[in-house]
Amino acid sequence: MTTLSNGVIFDAHLDLAWGTQLGRDLTLSLEDLREQDPVAGQTACVTFSELRRANVAACFGTLFACPASEDYPQGYDQTERDGWKGARRQAISQLDQYRRWQDAGFIRLLGSGEEVAAHVRAWNPEAPGPLGVTLLMEGADPLGSASDLDFWRAAGVRLIGPAWGRTRYAGGTDAPGPLTGRGEELLIAMREGGVVLDASHLDDASFEQAVALQPNVIASHSNSRTLVAGNRHLSDEMAAAITERGGVIGLVALSTFIRGGWQDGDPRATFGEWAKHARYYGETFGWEHVGLGTDLDGGFGLEKAPAGMQVYGDVRRLQSELPDEKWEGVRVGNWLKWAEANL
Ligand SMILES: [Zn+2]
Protein backbone atom coordinates (compact mmCIF):
# COMPACT_ATOMS: atom_id res chain seq x y z
CA MET A 1 0.00 0.00 0.00
CA THR A 2 1.41 3.37 -0.97
CA THR A 3 1.78 5.79 1.85
CA LEU A 4 -0.98 8.20 2.71
CA SER A 5 1.30 10.32 4.81
CA ASN A 6 0.50 13.43 2.79
CA GLY A 7 -2.22 14.24 5.30
CA VAL A 8 -5.15 13.55 3.04
CA ILE A 9 -8.65 13.29 4.56
CA PHE A 10 -11.69 11.17 3.66
CA ASP A 11 -14.99 12.43 5.06
CA ALA A 12 -17.84 9.90 4.94
CA HIS A 13 -20.64 12.45 5.26
CA LEU A 14 -20.96 15.83 3.58
CA ASP A 15 -24.35 17.24 2.55
CA LEU A 16 -22.83 19.21 -0.31
CA ALA A 17 -25.82 19.50 -2.66
CA TRP A 18 -28.15 20.17 0.25
CA GLY A 19 -26.20 23.38 0.83
CA THR A 20 -27.10 24.47 -2.69
CA GLN A 21 -30.74 23.74 -1.99
CA LEU A 22 -30.44 26.24 0.88
CA GLY A 23 -29.05 28.81 -1.54
CA ARG A 24 -25.35 28.38 -0.79
CA ASP A 25 -22.80 28.49 -3.60
CA LEU A 26 -19.98 26.12 -2.62
CA THR A 27 -17.86 27.24 -5.54
CA LEU A 28 -17.22 30.58 -3.80
CA SER A 29 -14.34 31.19 -1.44
CA LEU A 30 -15.37 30.69 2.18
CA GLU A 31 -14.99 34.40 2.80
CA ASP A 32 -17.37 35.27 -0.04
CA LEU A 33 -19.85 32.58 0.93
CA ARG A 34 -19.96 33.84 4.51
CA GLU A 35 -20.49 37.38 3.31
CA GLN A 36 -23.60 36.48 1.31
CA ASP A 37 -24.75 33.34 3.11
CA PRO A 38 -28.56 33.03 2.98
CA VAL A 39 -28.53 30.57 5.92
CA ALA A 40 -28.86 32.59 9.12
CA GLY A 41 -27.16 31.60 12.35
CA GLN A 42 -25.13 28.73 10.90
CA THR A 43 -21.68 29.94 9.91
CA ALA A 44 -20.46 27.85 6.98
CA CYS A 45 -17.08 26.14 6.94
CA VAL A 46 -17.37 24.02 3.77
CA THR A 47 -16.66 25.23 0.24
CA PHE A 48 -14.74 23.41 -2.46
CA SER A 49 -11.70 25.65 -2.05
CA GLU A 50 -11.78 25.14 1.71
CA LEU A 51 -11.97 21.36 1.35
CA ARG A 52 -9.02 21.51 -1.06
CA ARG A 53 -7.06 23.61 1.38
CA ALA A 54 -7.83 21.04 4.07
CA ASN A 55 -6.57 18.27 1.79
CA VAL A 56 -9.91 16.45 1.63
CA ALA A 57 -9.40 14.12 -1.33
CA ALA A 58 -12.75 12.35 -1.26
CA CYS A 59 -16.04 12.01 0.56
CA PHE A 60 -19.44 10.45 0.49
CA GLY A 61 -21.67 13.27 -0.77
CA THR A 62 -25.33 12.98 0.07
CA LEU A 63 -28.58 13.18 -1.79
CA PHE A 64 -30.74 14.36 1.08
CA ALA A 65 -34.43 15.05 0.60
CA CYS A 66 -35.82 17.09 3.46
CA PRO A 67 -39.39 16.54 4.64
CA ALA A 68 -41.53 19.60 5.30
CA SER A 69 -41.26 21.09 8.76
CA GLU A 70 -41.69 24.46 10.47
CA ASP A 71 -38.05 25.22 9.64
CA TYR A 72 -38.31 23.98 6.07
CA PRO A 73 -41.90 24.33 4.83
CA GLN A 74 -40.85 23.79 1.21
CA GLY A 75 -39.82 20.19 1.99
CA TYR A 76 -41.77 17.17 0.77
CA ASP A 77 -45.10 16.32 2.36
CA GLN A 78 -44.89 13.02 4.23
CA THR A 79 -48.60 13.01 4.98
CA GLU A 80 -49.68 12.87 1.33
CA ARG A 81 -49.85 9.59 -0.53
CA ASP A 82 -47.77 10.98 -3.38
CA GLY A 83 -45.69 13.22 -1.13
CA TRP A 84 -42.57 11.12 -1.79
CA LYS A 85 -42.49 12.57 -5.32
CA GLY A 86 -41.37 15.81 -3.73
CA ALA A 87 -38.49 13.86 -2.18
CA ARG A 88 -37.62 12.49 -5.61
CA ARG A 89 -37.63 16.02 -7.07
CA GLN A 90 -35.16 17.18 -4.41
CA ALA A 91 -32.86 14.20 -4.95
CA ILE A 92 -32.93 14.57 -8.75
CA SER A 93 -32.08 18.23 -8.49
CA GLN A 94 -29.19 17.43 -6.13
CA LEU A 95 -27.96 14.70 -8.49
CA ASP A 96 -28.04 17.25 -11.26
CA GLN A 97 -26.04 19.65 -9.06
CA TYR A 98 -23.30 17.05 -8.50
CA ARG A 99 -23.16 16.47 -12.26
CA ARG A 100 -22.83 20.18 -12.96
CA TRP A 101 -20.07 20.44 -10.38
CA GLN A 102 -18.35 17.54 -12.10
CA ASP A 103 -18.69 19.21 -15.52
CA ALA A 104 -17.22 22.39 -14.06
CA GLY A 105 -14.23 20.51 -12.61
CA PHE A 106 -15.02 20.93 -8.89
CA ILE A 107 -15.67 17.26 -8.18
CA ARG A 108 -15.16 13.83 -9.72
CA LEU A 109 -17.89 11.26 -9.16
CA LEU A 110 -16.40 7.95 -8.02
CA GLY A 111 -18.50 4.83 -8.45
CA SER A 112 -16.44 2.03 -6.92
CA GLY A 113 -14.01 1.35 -4.11
CA GLU A 114 -11.31 0.85 -6.68
CA GLU A 115 -11.96 4.31 -8.12
CA VAL A 116 -12.02 5.83 -4.64
CA ALA A 117 -8.70 4.20 -3.72
CA ALA A 118 -7.02 5.19 -6.99
CA HIS A 119 -8.25 8.77 -6.63
CA VAL A 120 -7.09 9.13 -3.02
CA ARG A 121 -3.74 7.44 -3.60
CA ALA A 122 -3.02 9.69 -6.58
CA TRP A 123 -3.91 12.81 -4.57
CA ASN A 124 -1.17 15.41 -4.67
CA PRO A 125 -1.53 18.14 -2.05
CA GLU A 126 0.76 20.35 -4.12
CA ALA A 127 -1.62 20.14 -7.07
CA PRO A 128 -4.98 19.02 -5.71
CA GLY A 129 -7.50 17.83 -8.28
CA PRO A 130 -11.29 17.77 -8.04
CA LEU A 131 -12.88 16.43 -4.85
CA GLY A 132 -13.78 12.75 -5.22
CA VAL A 133 -17.47 12.19 -4.43
CA THR A 134 -19.32 8.90 -4.04
CA LEU A 135 -23.07 9.39 -3.81
CA LEU A 136 -24.89 8.39 -0.63
CA MET A 137 -28.65 8.73 -0.36
CA GLU A 138 -29.72 9.83 3.13
CA GLY A 139 -33.34 8.79 3.66
CA ALA A 140 -34.83 6.51 0.98
CA ASP A 141 -38.03 8.43 0.27
CA PRO A 142 -36.81 9.59 -3.18
CA LEU A 143 -37.38 6.00 -4.28
CA GLY A 144 -40.99 5.21 -5.18
CA SER A 145 -40.28 1.58 -4.34
CA ALA A 146 -37.44 -0.94 -4.44
CA SER A 147 -37.85 -1.17 -8.21
CA ASP A 148 -36.43 2.38 -8.50
CA LEU A 149 -33.10 1.17 -7.12
CA ASP A 150 -31.77 0.38 -10.61
CA PHE A 151 -32.30 3.99 -11.66
CA TRP A 152 -30.41 5.41 -8.68
CA ARG A 153 -27.67 2.83 -8.91
CA ALA A 154 -27.15 3.73 -12.56
CA ALA A 155 -27.04 7.38 -11.49
CA GLY A 156 -24.12 6.55 -9.21
CA VAL A 157 -25.70 6.01 -5.78
CA ARG A 158 -23.55 3.45 -3.94
CA LEU A 159 -24.87 3.76 -0.39
CA ILE A 160 -28.35 4.29 1.03
CA GLY A 161 -29.47 5.11 4.55
CA PRO A 162 -33.15 4.10 4.50
CA ALA A 163 -34.11 6.41 7.38
CA TRP A 164 -33.65 10.00 8.51
CA GLY A 165 -36.65 10.61 10.68
CA ARG A 166 -39.32 8.07 9.77
CA THR A 167 -39.47 7.39 6.05
CA ARG A 168 -41.71 5.14 4.01
CA TYR A 169 -38.98 2.54 4.47
CA ALA A 170 -37.89 2.57 8.10
CA GLY A 171 -38.21 3.92 11.60
CA GLY A 172 -35.52 6.52 12.22
CA THR A 173 -34.24 9.28 14.47
CA ASP A 174 -36.82 10.14 17.16
CA ALA A 175 -39.32 8.03 15.20
CA PRO A 176 -38.94 4.45 16.46
CA GLY A 177 -40.18 1.57 14.40
CA PRO A 178 -39.23 -1.37 12.22
CA LEU A 179 -38.67 -1.60 8.50
CA THR A 180 -41.88 -1.38 6.52
CA GLY A 181 -42.69 -4.02 3.93
CA ARG A 182 -41.36 -1.61 1.33
CA GLY A 183 -38.22 -1.27 3.44
CA GLU A 184 -37.64 -5.02 3.50
CA GLU A 185 -37.95 -5.13 -0.29
CA LEU A 186 -35.47 -2.27 -0.62
CA LEU A 187 -32.88 -3.94 1.64
CA ILE A 188 -33.10 -7.14 -0.39
CA ALA A 189 -32.72 -5.17 -3.62
CA MET A 190 -29.72 -3.33 -2.13
CA ARG A 191 -28.05 -6.62 -1.23
CA GLU A 192 -28.69 -8.01 -4.71
CA GLY A 193 -27.66 -4.76 -6.42
CA GLY A 194 -24.53 -4.21 -4.34
CA VAL A 195 -25.71 -0.97 -2.70
CA VAL A 196 -24.24 -0.50 0.78
CA LEU A 197 -26.47 0.03 3.82
CA ASP A 198 -25.76 3.22 5.77
CA ALA A 199 -27.12 2.51 9.25
CA SER A 200 -26.95 6.11 10.48
CA HIS A 201 -30.42 7.35 11.55
CA LEU A 202 -31.93 3.84 11.66
CA ASP A 203 -33.95 3.10 14.77
CA ASP A 204 -32.92 -0.03 16.69
CA ALA A 205 -35.88 -2.07 15.43
CA SER A 206 -35.28 -1.25 11.77
CA PHE A 207 -31.49 -1.59 12.23
CA GLU A 208 -31.71 -5.18 13.38
CA GLN A 209 -33.85 -6.18 10.40
CA ALA A 210 -31.78 -4.17 7.95
CA VAL A 211 -28.38 -5.68 8.78
CA ALA A 212 -29.91 -9.14 8.59
CA LEU A 213 -31.04 -8.39 5.02
CA GLN A 214 -27.97 -6.40 3.87
CA PRO A 215 -24.83 -7.22 5.85
CA ASN A 216 -22.64 -4.82 3.83
CA VAL A 217 -23.12 -2.01 6.33
CA ILE A 218 -21.45 1.15 7.63
CA ALA A 219 -22.57 4.15 9.68
CA SER A 220 -21.50 7.25 7.75
CA HIS A 221 -22.10 9.69 10.63
CA SER A 222 -22.94 8.27 14.05
CA ASN A 223 -21.46 8.89 17.49
CA SER A 224 -21.80 6.52 20.45
CA ARG A 225 -24.97 6.14 22.50
CA THR A 226 -22.84 5.08 25.45
CA LEU A 227 -21.63 8.70 25.61
CA VAL A 228 -24.77 10.50 24.36
CA ALA A 229 -28.27 9.12 24.92
CA GLY A 230 -30.87 8.76 22.18
CA ASN A 231 -31.69 6.62 19.18
CA ARG A 232 -29.75 8.92 16.81
CA HIS A 233 -26.55 7.37 18.19
CA LEU A 234 -25.24 3.82 17.94
CA SER A 235 -25.85 1.45 20.83
CA ASP A 236 -23.02 -0.97 21.58
CA GLU A 237 -25.09 -3.72 19.97
CA MET A 238 -25.39 -1.69 16.78
CA ALA A 239 -21.71 -0.74 16.72
CA ALA A 240 -20.80 -4.40 17.29
CA ALA A 241 -23.09 -5.52 14.46
CA ILE A 242 -21.53 -3.00 12.06
CA THR A 243 -17.91 -3.68 12.98
CA GLU A 244 -18.33 -7.47 13.05
CA ARG A 245 -19.44 -7.15 9.44
CA GLY A 246 -16.32 -5.16 8.60
CA GLY A 247 -18.01 -1.74 8.53
CA VAL A 248 -16.57 1.62 9.53
CA ILE A 249 -18.26 4.29 11.66
CA GLY A 250 -17.89 8.02 10.89
CA LEU A 251 -17.46 10.52 13.75
CA VAL A 252 -19.89 13.49 13.67
CA ALA A 253 -18.63 16.97 14.57
CA LEU A 254 -21.88 18.26 16.11
CA SER A 255 -21.79 19.41 19.76
CA THR A 256 -25.29 18.02 20.44
CA PHE A 257 -24.04 14.59 19.37
CA ILE A 258 -20.70 14.90 21.18
CA ARG A 259 -21.78 15.94 24.67
CA GLY A 260 -24.99 14.62 26.24
CA GLY A 261 -27.39 17.40 27.20
CA TRP A 262 -25.69 20.06 25.06
CA GLN A 263 -28.05 22.90 24.19
CA ASP A 264 -27.91 25.98 22.01
CA GLY A 265 -25.90 28.64 23.78
CA ASP A 266 -23.84 26.19 25.86
CA PRO A 267 -20.07 26.33 25.40
CA ARG A 268 -19.25 24.26 22.35
CA ALA A 269 -18.08 20.68 22.86
CA THR A 270 -14.31 20.29 22.74
CA PHE A 271 -12.12 18.30 20.39
CA GLY A 272 -11.18 16.24 23.46
CA GLU A 273 -14.83 15.33 23.98
CA TRP A 274 -15.20 14.50 20.27
CA ALA A 275 -12.16 12.25 20.54
CA LYS A 276 -13.83 10.32 23.38
CA HIS A 277 -16.22 8.85 20.81
CA ALA A 278 -13.26 7.79 18.66
CA ARG A 279 -11.48 6.25 21.64
CA TYR A 280 -14.58 4.48 22.82
CA TYR A 281 -15.21 2.92 19.41
CA GLY A 282 -11.52 2.22 18.87
CA GLU A 283 -10.90 0.57 22.22
CA THR A 284 -14.17 -1.36 22.26
CA PHE A 285 -14.60 -2.43 18.63
CA GLY A 286 -11.17 -1.87 17.03
CA TRP A 287 -9.54 1.28 15.68
CA GLU A 288 -9.73 -0.01 12.11
CA HIS A 289 -13.49 0.68 12.29
CA VAL A 290 -13.20 4.39 13.13
CA GLY A 291 -13.29 7.16 10.53
CA LEU A 292 -14.59 10.67 9.94
CA GLY A 293 -18.16 11.48 8.95
CA THR A 294 -18.24 15.08 10.09
CA ASP A 295 -21.57 16.17 8.56
CA LEU A 296 -20.14 19.71 8.62
CA ASP A 297 -22.54 22.33 7.26
CA GLY A 298 -25.26 19.67 7.10
CA GLY A 299 -27.89 21.53 9.10
CA PHE A 300 -25.45 23.18 11.50
CA GLY A 301 -22.59 25.65 11.38
CA LEU A 302 -19.54 26.54 13.42
CA GLU A 303 -21.84 27.55 16.28
CA LYS A 304 -22.38 23.83 16.97
CA ALA A 305 -19.04 22.42 15.83
CA PRO A 306 -16.26 21.70 18.36
CA ALA A 307 -14.73 24.76 20.03
CA GLY A 308 -11.77 26.06 18.05
CA MET A 309 -13.19 25.08 14.68
CA GLN A 310 -13.10 28.10 12.37
CA VAL A 311 -12.76 26.42 8.98
CA TYR A 312 -13.10 22.85 7.80
CA GLY A 313 -9.36 22.24 8.06
CA ASP A 314 -9.55 22.55 11.84
CA VAL A 315 -10.90 18.99 11.82
CA ARG A 316 -7.19 18.17 12.11
CA ARG A 317 -7.23 19.35 15.72
CA LEU A 318 -8.66 15.94 16.48
CA GLN A 319 -5.23 14.47 15.81
CA SER A 320 -3.67 15.74 19.04
CA GLU A 321 -6.47 14.08 21.04
CA LEU A 322 -5.91 10.62 19.56
CA PRO A 323 -3.11 8.07 19.89
CA ASP A 324 -0.48 9.13 17.33
CA GLU A 325 -0.47 5.89 15.41
CA LYS A 326 -4.29 5.90 14.98
CA TRP A 327 -4.73 9.24 13.23
CA GLU A 328 -3.87 8.12 9.71
CA GLY A 329 -6.46 5.34 9.90
CA VAL A 330 -9.12 7.68 11.29
CA ARG A 331 -8.56 10.50 8.80
CA VAL A 332 -8.40 8.30 5.68
CA GLY A 333 -6.94 4.81 5.91
CA ASN A 334 -9.85 2.94 7.47
CA TRP A 335 -12.46 4.24 5.02
CA LEU A 336 -10.10 3.55 2.15
CA LYS A 337 -9.47 -0.05 3.15
CA TRP A 338 -13.18 -0.53 3.70
CA ALA A 339 -14.01 0.96 0.32
CA GLU A 340 -11.54 -1.23 -1.53
CA ALA A 341 -13.04 -4.34 0.01
CA ASN A 342 -16.73 -3.44 0.09
CA LEU A 343 -17.73 -0.61 -2.22
ZN1 LIG B 1 -27.79 12.86 8.94
Image (tube, rainbow, N blue to C red):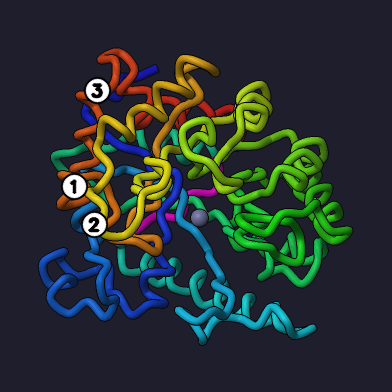
Residue 304: percent from the left, percent from the top? Answer: 29, 55
Mark earlier in primary sequence (1, 2)? 2
Give the amino acid type for the residue marked by disc 2 in the picture. Answer: Leu
**Dot in front, 3 or 1:** 1
Give the amino acid type for the residue marked by disc 3 in the picture. Answer: Ser
Name the residue: 24% across, 38% down.
270
Q: Is residue 131 above or below residue 167?
A: above
Looking at the rendered structure, the secondary structure element under dot 2 is: helix
Name the residue: 37% across, 74% down.
20
Q: Is residue 215 above or below residue 88?
A: above
Looking at the rendered structure, the secondary structure element under dot 1 is: loop
Q: Which residue is mark 1?
A: 309
Name the residue: 23% across, 30% down.
7
Mark on residue 302?
A: 2
Q: Is residue 8 above or below residue 89?
A: above
Q: Is residue 186 left or right of residue 10?
A: right
Name the residue: 71% across, 54% down.
176
Residue 281: percent from the left, percent from the top? Answer: 48, 24
Q: CA distance from mark 3 to mark 1?
A: 23 Å
Q: Is mark 2 within 8 Å of ligand 1?
A: no
Pointers 1 and 2 in contact (C-beta within 8 Å): yes
**Dot in front, 2 or 3:** 2
Residue 52: percent from the left, percent from the top? Answer: 22, 50
Task: Give the magenta range.
Answer: 107-112
Mark on residue 5?
A: 3
Q: Looking at the image, which is closer to me, 48 or 218?
A: 218
